[in-house]
Amino acid sequence: MTKSALIGTAAAVFMTALTPTTLVAQDSYHLRFADIGPPRGTRAEVMMWWADEIKSRSDGRVEIEFFWGGALANPASMVDSVGSGLADMGYVVGEYTTLLSRMAFASIPYVENDPWVAMRATFDTVSENEDVQDQLAETGVQFLNTFGPGPTQILSREPITTVEEFAGKKFQGAGAWQDWGKAMGAVPVTLPYHEGYQALERGTTDALQGWITVTRAYKLYEVSPHITLANSGMTTSTGVVINQELFDSMPADLKAILQDTSVELMDRYAQALTAETDTIMEALTQGVDGYKVTFHELPEDELARWKERAAFLVPAYVDAANESGLDGQAIWDAYSANLEKYRQIVATEGYPWTE
């Protein structure tokens, strides 16, 4: 075989590896799922339930194989990896890519703390808004749901209970939480979340944006003996995506199974977050693996000061969206209306799992 033929063959093999599992309808699918997190913790547990449920409902025609810990893609490359077909599906975090900038409305501090309300409202807004859908079409991915790991708290090496104690701390956050940290007087540190453990351990950071269930999954309790219950809102510009071309090629019945089960996954995850948060906090207070965590609640007057320093973020989002040619206020109003819709459902009907 000539050198040029060898190069051509190698290129063909490489391009095949970057092509989605299939682009025409098949009898069965083996889908590669790229995940940035570890195979443990609340989210991993419900993700594995989801994959098993899809396999069962499809009579084995759809099987999902997880590649945990960034084995197929890191947070910054996840959208590109799924859009190009390097992975068939993946878990994306909007704050780590500019390709999902139009979803920034879903990750603003002190907007919503209820996991179910925030996840459902975000997914409806993403599904209904043409500007957001246009951006997703450009990336080649489709959201099957949107996620959020619970209210955002502050993990730290030393106690942080006032604005003054936060000021000057080296703070690792993402997106709007980084901007809020600056408004609190903190020194911003930009790192991928999976490097948060080492950063706290080495003193590269003093504090980290975090969540109770994620603290357990990533074993952050080993390096953050203090957690401030800032209850500063949800980050729901995250979720499960699938390669758009692959999804479009699938039979209608399998599409429906993927979509329906993924929506149910939001409910199951919200239920698990609600049920497990108090249990995890109690365990961490008593001690896990020899490590104890002290939880700090903020008095109402102090909490008001923390919220006040986030007040500029919604107008900032609207202005940034307007500057990019979008109707930022319309997107925000749609999201706000969806939040209110689900708050009312909870108030009048309860959660789906309490029926």
Image: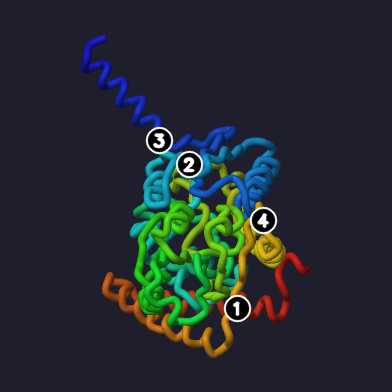
Residue type at tag 2: Asp
Residue lying at the far top of the rendered structure: 1
Residue type at tag 4: Val
Residue for point 27% across, 22% down: 8
Can you identify the residue that label 1 sits on? 297
- CA gap, disc 4 and disc 1: 21 Å
- CA gap, disc 2 and disc 4: 36 Å
Of marks 3 and 4, the one in the foreground? 4
Residue 269's quadrant in the figure?
bottom right
**Which callout, 1 or 2, points at the residue further toward the start of the chain?**
2
**Which callout, 3 or 4, points at the residue further toward the start of the chain?**
3
Can you identify the residue that label 4 sits on? 288
**Which callout, 2 or 4, points at the residue further toward the start of the chain?**
2
Can you identify the residue that label 2 sits on? 88
Instruction: Tell which of 154 and 213 is nearer to you.
Output: 154
**Which callout, 1 or 3, points at the residue further toward the start of the chain?**
3
Q: Secondary structure at mark 3?
A: loop
- CA gap, disc 3 and disc 4: 44 Å
